[in-house]
Image (spheres, rainbow, N blue to C red):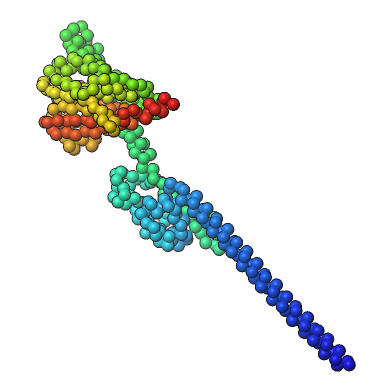
Amino acid sequence: MTTGIAIFSALAALAALIVLAIRMRRSGAESKVEINAWRQRLEHDLQQARDERNRLLDALGDAFLLVDDSGTVRFANSAAHDLFSSNELVGKAVREVIHDPRLAKSVARCLSTGEPIQSQVVLPQQTSPRGDQENRGINAWVIDAARMPPQPDGGTTTRIILRDVTAEHHIEQIRKDFVANASHELRTPMAIINGYLENLLDDNLVEETEMARRFLTIMRKHSDRISRIIEDMLVISRLESGEANSLKIEPFRFRSCIHDVMERLESVIRGQNAEIQVVMPDETLIIHGDRFYWTQVLFNLVENALKQNPHPGLRVEVGCTQHAGGIHIWVADNGIGIPSADLPHIFRRFYRVEKHHSTREIKGTGLGLSIVKRAIEAHRGSIGVTSVPGRETKFLISIPLQSPVSAENEV
């Protein structure tokens, strides 16, 4: 009896152990499932965070790289892939990605010292990070590198931003050149005027009427030149400072604009025995634009043809036709032409083509064609030039039928 009870108790205990073991196994399995579920959820959240980070960094317009402490690229955004024309940047050494030593030097310094670096580098076209895509000549870049906070495992990561500032560099260079050229152009006539004034006053030439008149005539020419330079600089300043967005856009007959220019230049045309021919199939053609600037455009182009070809018998043709895509305007002459080496530069400020001129002549401002180009661009148009020396030089302007500027102003 006692033995039976003992056996029964042992069997009961064994059964209890079996049940406990089964429960523990089930609990372990459930815990494992729960742990796996948490792990998957965590990995999903981490992946979402990475995707969000990548989307944000891909939205940057600048090239962005993450580099580990061994100098290996661990992340590159879309702008970086586009810049370096490669889909395989991750895993490469940063020195294989950024080849130019002037850019690589800043990165190497940040990686070795941990100091944040920001520097601007100006490169020739041949060594641009854009490689064969570069067609802007001199290009400028800001490289910004800094070490990020340490990672939990003790590793370090350096972020590198490569920003294209070529446009800003060109604008700054244009500004510097403009100031330098303007100072030079104004200094020359001022020096001449001051020189003649000294002669008149110090040499007591005021009472010599004929000599004084000759000196004053020369001084007046150079003072007129100073006034013209200042006027032209103010026009360019208005066109480039945002005032072009508030052009006085209105419809006007282009033929009347041509007539105004012919009147202003009548004495020069007659003095040079030049011939001006107007070619307009439609004399009533209407242009939407700022008449002041269009008068400036035509005046500068026709005057330029007359100045560059002072010999008698010059023929200048001013034409305007309308077609399905817009309006074509041209000014052509049969003068000495423009050398091919000068053609790419003639719209630059203060650029002149006048090797054939006498040194006694009063120079132009060198701003006329620059004003022409900017005034046309303000009307959403374009201008080009072709020249066959001795045969024909032709400036061709293309503008839309109705300038988008006018549509904006009518709203």
Question: In the rendering, at what x and y percent does residue 56 appear?
Answer: 50, 50
Q: Nearer the viewer, residue 293 or 241?
A: 293
Q: Kindly tell me whether residue 334 is visible in this rendering.
A: yes
* Above-or-below relation of 380 to 92: above
Q: Nearer the viewer, residue 226 or 280?
A: 280
Determine whether, in the image, residue 75 is placed left or right of residue 220: right
Determine whether, in the image, residue 263 is placed left or right of residue 103: left
The residue depicted at 36 percent of the width and 36 percent of the height is 172
The residue depicted at 35 percent of the width and 54 percent of the height is 85
The residue depicted at 55 percent of the width and 55 percent of the height is 49
Question: In the rendering, at what x and y percent does residue 326 appear?
Answer: 29, 31
Give residue 21's quadrant in the image: bottom right
Question: In the rendering, at what x and y percent does residue 230 appear?
Answer: 31, 22
Determine whether, in the image, residue 46 is placed left or right of residue 377: right
Q: Nearer the viewer, residue 406 or 312?
A: 406
Looking at the rendering, in which quadrant would you find the N terminus? bottom right
Question: In the rendering, at what x and y percent does residue 377 appear?
Answer: 32, 31
The residue depicted at 33 percent of the width and 21 percent of the height is 251
